Image (cartoon, grey):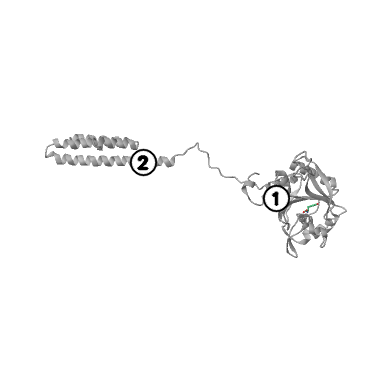
Amino acid sequence: MEEEIREIQKQAIKEANQAETPDHIEQLRVKYLGRKGLVNRLFSELGSISAEEKPKVGNMLNSLKNSITETLSEAKSRIGVARDDLKCERIDVTMPGTKRPLGNLHPLTQVTNRINEIFLNLGFKIAEGPEIETPHYNFEALNIPLEHPSRDAFDTFYIDDNTLLRSQTSTVQIRVMEKEKPPLQVIAPGKVFRPDATDASHSFMFHQVEGFMVDKDIKFSDLKGILTLFSKQMFGEDIKMRFRPHFFPFTEPSAEVDISCMICKGKGCRVCSHKGWLEILGAGMIHPRLFEMVGYDPKKWTGFAFGMGVERIAMLKFGVDDIRLFFENDLRFLRQF
Ligand code: DAH
């Protein structure tokens, strides 16, 4: 019997080591420790053993039972740990990756970049000026004297008598001409401010791109050529342009420039108020008085200038019908561009 006990012990350890699932362990438990298992069978055979042998064999049987119990519980936890390890190490290589949300440029930045790009390709360079200005650069140097009625057209936020938020980027014309000598080909993108009541087409802050060129013999036809090229590159080859006479204090002659409505192709629709045309910018030949102001000889130099609203161009290009959408930071709107 002692021999048999040792055999069973060995066998149990071997089988427990080979067990791979909790089910295997359970089968071994039934086989060895179950009510009709091997260990109980041996216990029931104790009765047929001699009185001297009985205590020793009884002890051996007890330690067999304990040792098998222990072996099985060790095997059980070995399997459990292995399974947990597997669980956390499992990598499903077929799973889709985690998407990192990618932002995009604001539609106004995109349009400004496009305007800049078109003019850079034509040999213009980019200049910037301050948003906080003096009345001199915003008005006087642009031939808008104090008390001149056209000053109202450029209604302005004043900080104090001699400081204001610029209401137009034409200021940069003066700042660049003061510092540099012709020939000049410059565009000046930036923010401007006007105390307008906010509605679908007005905002107290918006963006303009000013452009100008100064050289010998610059003619109105040069202005027309450059702006026609610009509008075709911005809006498409089949866009038409027209120049309407207008007044600006800093240019003479001056014009407002329209493009044919890209929605109805000039037939007339809601977007163009049934006119077939959309105003996109103001332009003209730089007034000789501006040249005098910056010390250029107006007999020697001529030039053209133009100014466009970035929001207006973005609205036409993208079909946006409310300027406020650009500034509300609503991602549902911004993600569309
Ligand atoms: N500064 C004008 C505005 O803010 C736009 C403008 C018109 C600019 C005619 C020009 C120009 O350079 O020649 O409304």
Label 1 sits on a secondary structure element that is helix
Q: Are marks 2 and 1 in contact (CB under 8 Å)?
A: no
Residue 163 screen position, x and y as percent: 74, 63
Q: Determine whether 238 is above or below 185 in the image.
A: above
Q: Nearer the viewer, residue 125 or 54?
A: 54
Residue 130 screen position, x and y as percent: 72, 57
Position of 199 with respect to 23 (left or right) is right
Residue 45 screen position, x and y as percent: 17, 35
Q: Residue at x 79, y 55 (%)?
A: 177
Residue 157 screen position, x and y as percent: 73, 60
Position of 15 with respect to 231 (left or right) is left
- 10 Å neighbourhood of mark 1: few (<14), some, or many (≥20)? some
Q: Tell me the distance, in whole angstroms, between the alpha carbons under discs 2 and 1.
A: 64 Å
* Image quadrant where one finds the C terminus: top right
Q: Quadrant of residue 19?
A: top left
Label 1 sits on residue: 323
Position of 28 with respect to 249 (left or right) is left
Q: Determine whether 145 is above or below 58 in the image.
A: below
Label 2 sits on residue: 80
* Image quadrant where one finds the N terminus: top left
Q: Residue furthest left?
A: 51
Q: Residue at x 43, y 42 (%)?
A: 88
Q: Is residue 46 visible?
A: yes
Counting residues from the N terminus, which is met first, the one under dot 2 or under dot 1? 2
Q: Is residue 116 visible?
A: no
Label 1 CB less than 8 angstroms from ligand 1: no
Q: Nearer the viewer, residue 156 or 53?
A: 156
Q: Nearer the viewer, residue 291 or 103?
A: 103
Three-letter residue code for mark 1: Ile
The image shows a total of numbered marks equal to 2
Q: Residue at x 39, y 42 (%)?
A: 84
Three-letter residue code for mark 2: Gly
